[in-house]
Amino acid sequence: MWFKKLGVNKIFVLPAFLLVFSMALSACAIPAGKQQAKNAIIQTVVVDSLVGTQAASTLTAIIQTPTSKPQPTTAVPATSTPTPTPSPYASPTMAGVWLTLQEDTYCFAGPGGGYEMLFFIGSNQLVEAMARDPMDDYYYIRDPKTYSQFCWIPGVVTSVSGDVSRLPVLTPEPLAAPIIVEPETPAMKDFYVYYEKTLNCDDSYGLVFYIENTGSVIWRSIRVLMTDYWTYKTYMHDSDIFRGTTSDPCVLDMENAQDDLQIGEGSPVACVNAGQFNYDPTGHPFSVRITLYSLDGRKGDSITKTLTFKP
């Protein structure tokens, strides 16, 4: 490239130099007026020569500039990003041991019907088990409504979901032994009670107790809570009168019914309407809590006694 550019410059520069040199020699012998005209011609020639030189250089640069040849474009195949295969998703399960109640039941302060009944839980309720008793008969649960109170329900009325063996064993305080006051030692608030018999009327059964007022308070109403340890069911009898049945177990003895138990008075109490069973409880272990009240409607002063027996 450089050699071609030098050759083009020689074509225009050498003749222009010779022309200027010859005119300079001739100027020495030319008069002043003609000399000025020749100088003007010489300047014009020189300018044309320079313009030509610049044009030649520009032309050479244009000619010698290589033209880049477009390269064929090779299409790069698009690479698809593989979609990750989702890992199998395991459905969440509830940890711990959960119980579903198969029927209505009470929640007790301890593992047994002899303890205080705290509240009622309906069937189909789902509850969380926190512990179990040493006999695996009762579960210690969390109150499904408040989640802040705990109590015991019988396991026989529940279906279990979870590993029961992982539950801790909780041994509650035993029930206080019932205090039995002898009839000859009356107290301010006292009564004497014993299981008398079991009634059978068609397909219904009822327990009968005999109660005698051995204290100095008049009793006007009664509540009897009967828990069958065989079936883990609890039944309740409330009444403002004290009455038994006639010789016919299906007929209540309203003629001899009493509105109250005066001091020294006694009366049979048939636990029917309500409180009867739809099965024969003979031979079943029972715990019965009997409470007498000084006013109607289970109000006023009260005293409670507990019996354990098998009818």
Image (cartoon, rainbow, N blue to C red):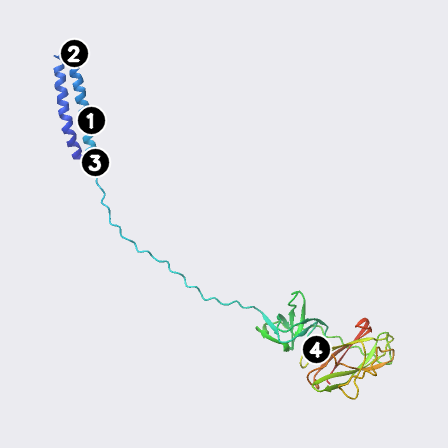
Residue at screen point 73% across, 87% down? 200
Find residue 126 and report its horizontal and vertical position in percent: 61, 70
State how far apart marks 1 and 2 are (Cα): 28 Å
Q: The residue under label 1 is which amino acid type?
A: Val
Q: Earlier in the sequence, mark 3 or mark 1?
A: 1
Residue at screen point 18% across, 21% down? 44
Q: Which residue is mark 4?
A: 234
Q: The residue under label 4 is which amino acid type?
A: Thr
Residue at screen point 64% across, 70% down? 141
Quadrant of res 5: top left
Q: Which residue is mark 2?
A: 33
Find residue 206 and report its horizontal and vertical position in percent: 74, 83
Q: Residues within 10 Å of mark 4 (few under 14, many from 20)?
A: some
State how far apart marks 2 and 4 are (Cα): 151 Å
Q: Earlier in the sequence, mark 3 or mark 4?
A: 3
Viewport quadrant of the C terminus: bottom right
Q: Earlier in the sequence, mark 2 or mark 4?
A: 2
State how far apart marks 3 and 4 are (Cα): 114 Å
Q: Say the numbered circle drawn on residue 62.
A: 3
Q: Which residue is mark 1?
A: 51
Q: The residue under label 2 is which amino acid type?
A: Gly
Seen from the viewer's position, the closer of residues 214 and 241 is 241
State how far apart marks 1 and 4 are (Cα): 127 Å
In contact (CB < 8 Å): disc 1 and disc 4: no
Quadrant of res 189: bottom right
Of all residues, the one furthest to the bottom in this rendering is: 247
Q: Is residue 190 above or below residue 39?
A: below
Q: The residue under label 3 is which amino acid type?
A: Ile
In contact (CB < 8 Å): disc 1 and disc 2: no
State how far apart marks 3 and 2 are (Cα): 44 Å
Q: Residues within 10 Å of mark 3 (few under 14, many from 20)?
A: few
